[in-house]
Amino acid sequence: MCAELHPTGGRPVYGDVLAWVVDATVGVVVARLGGAGPDETLILDVRFAEGRYVDGEALPPSERWVLRTVSAFLAEDLVEGERSYTAAEQFDITMRAEILADALIWLDFVLDVDLPDPPDMATAQEG
């Protein structure tokens, strides 16, 4: 893992760190599953290990924030994603910490989930 120095010479601000974690999560999902095609939208469904759907509204607020924000960026709804970042920066310190911790947990999970690598586009087009 590497970190760039913050432009002001100090530590990265909360929003920058949170955006990096969410962007990394979205990037891993797209890299593993492929991006949306023309006239398609990626939709994030979360399920329990046995296959039941997770009700996003029943999740704790910090997990719900991660689900909604990652979903917004997967759907390329940049306005909603940016609104989520702005809202997160206004939460109290405990909620901000919970959101960041949950975002890291989600990133760790998508890095470890057992999915096939996406097809190599050059190979897929030849076959």
Image (tube, rainbow, N blue to C red):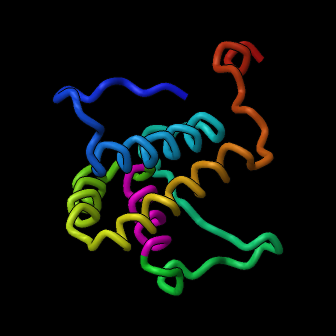
Q: Residue furthest bottom?
A: 58
Residue drawn at the location 35% of the way across and 65% of the way down = 96
Q: Quadrant of the N terminus?
A: top right
The percent position of residue 71, horizontal first and vertical second, equals 45, 59
Q: Residue at x 72, y 13 (%)?
A: 126
Asked whether 71 falls inside the magenta stretch, the response is: yes
Where residue 68 sits, quadrant-wise, is bottom left
> Above or below — where is 12 with respect to 80?
above
Q: Quick check: 8 above or below 54?
A: above
- Residue 38: percent from the left, percent from the top? 44, 38
Q: Is residue 124 left or right of residue 67?
A: right
Answer left or right for 48 relative to 83: right
Report x, y in % for residue 57.
47, 83
The quadrant of the image that shows the C terminus is: top right
Q: In the image as oriented, which residue stretches furthest toward the front?
A: 10
Tell me which residue sits at (45%, 68%) in the image: 98
Task: Pick the residue in front: 116 or 97.
Answer: 97
Residue 24 x %, y %: 49, 40
How many labels sit on residues? 0
Residue at the extreme left:
8
Please tell me in which quadrant of the rendered image residue 39 appears: top left
Please tell me whether the stretch drawn in magenta is mainly helix, strand or loop: helix
Residue at left offset 35%, top offset 46%:
19
64 magenta-colored = yes
Q: Which residues are magenta?
A: 62-73
Q: With 78 as the anchor, is 34 left or right in this view?
A: right
Of 126 and 121, nearer the camera is 121
